[in-house]
Image: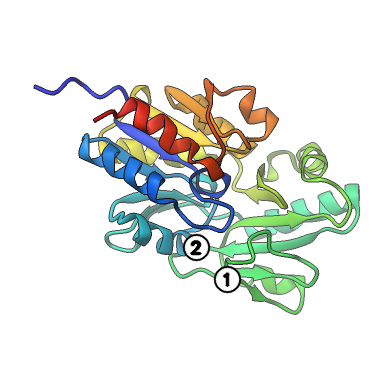
Amino acid sequence: MAPPLAYALIATDLDGTLLRGDDTLSERSLAALARVADAGARHLVVTGRSAPRVRPLLETLGTTGLAVCGQGAQVYDAGTDRLLWSVTLDRELAETALGKIEAEVGEVYAAVDQDGVDGLTLVEPGYRMPHPTLPAVRVDRRDDLWRTPISKVLLRHPVLSDDELAVAARGVVGSLATVTMSGPGTVELQPCGITKATGLALAAERLGLGRESALAFGDMPNDIPMFQWAARGVAMANAHPELKAVADEVTLSNEDDGIAVVLERLFAQ
């Protein structure tokens, strides 16, 4: 009989973690994840990207199971191409929160991810996408952002750093939304109380797995709730200092196959 797995659930962020800077996966990372699958463990993508922006990467990974998307607001089933669970951000609350932020820090530029498996990313004038490879639709005015249900709002400030904008936003938004910082140029508003841990816990429950068997990898402060939920959290060498401060381990960077290094050690053949 094979010994029990130390970690039966491997949860990985995408940008800055599993993906390289050019949005590709290395052969070494793919091989390490294949080793995880051969051992009987499950791999879950847990990302801030919405389901439509994740679908092509799941195809590359050969994933036909679950993925946690939209900062935990979506549990997506790749096999049936449908959302098993989804929480939207109230558009009136989002607009109010945006107004409070601008009253505090001046003009910001906004984008939204629409809800649904075919939802678009809508971008208002002045907003620059942090990931040029991700598709987006430019709209003429901010009111156009609110025309259909959304999963989150993405914010950029012309002068303030991401850390400064996130701190200012948290100071004025209150219970209107949850403020996260998920990557360079990516401060976000999502439904209040929703984090990556929310979606991860729901997906794990559907898989019949608990937090005691979960190993999580990440690089930004939005991964902190996931680390707090999982049995062990591993930060990348390129991770934000706030995440490194709560990590159980720091591995190599995403460019140096940091995830593969850890998985090869834990799932030695």
Q: Report whether 88 appears left or right of 178.
A: left
Q: Can you give x and y, in whole percent of width and height, for residue 214 in the image?
A: 38, 28
Distance CA(mark 2)–CA(mark 1): 8 Å
Q: Report whether 86 appears left or right of 123.
A: left
Residue 150 sits in quarter: bottom right
> Which residue lies at the image location 50% right of the left edge and 48% below the top edge?
14
Residue corresponding to mark 2: 53
Q: Can you give x and y, in whole percent of width and height, for residue 143 in the image?
A: 73, 72
Q: Which is nearer the eye, 263 or 162?
A: 263
Is 169 above or below relative to 264? Answer: below
- Screen quadrant of the C terminus: top left
Q: Which mark is residue 191?
A: none
Is 137 above or below relative to 90? Answer: below
Mark 2 or mark 1: whose residue is earlier in sequence: 2
Q: Can you give x and y, in whole percent of width and height, for residue 62 in the image?
A: 30, 56
Q: Residue furthest left?
A: 1
Residue corresponding to mark 1: 135
Q: Residues within 10 Å of mark 2 (few under 14, many from 20)?
A: many
Q: Residues within 10 Å of mark 1 (few under 14, many from 20)?
A: few
Q: Which is nearer the eye, 75 or 96?
A: 75
- Tag 2: residue type? Arg
Q: Can you give x and y, in whole percent of width and height, for residue 221 in the image?
A: 64, 36
> Which residue lies at the image location 21% right of the left edge and 36% below the top edge?
40
Q: Which is nearer the eye, 237 or 155?
A: 237
> Which residue lies at the image location 41% right of the left edge and 62% below the top edge?
55
Q: Are marks 2 and 1 in contact (CB under 8 Å)?
A: yes
- Tag 1: residue type? Pro
Q: Secondary structure at mark 2?
A: helix
Residue 195 sits in quarter: top right
Residue 179 in view, yes or no: no
Q: Report whether 85 appears left or right of 228.
A: left
Q: Which is nearer the eye, 241 or 207?
A: 241
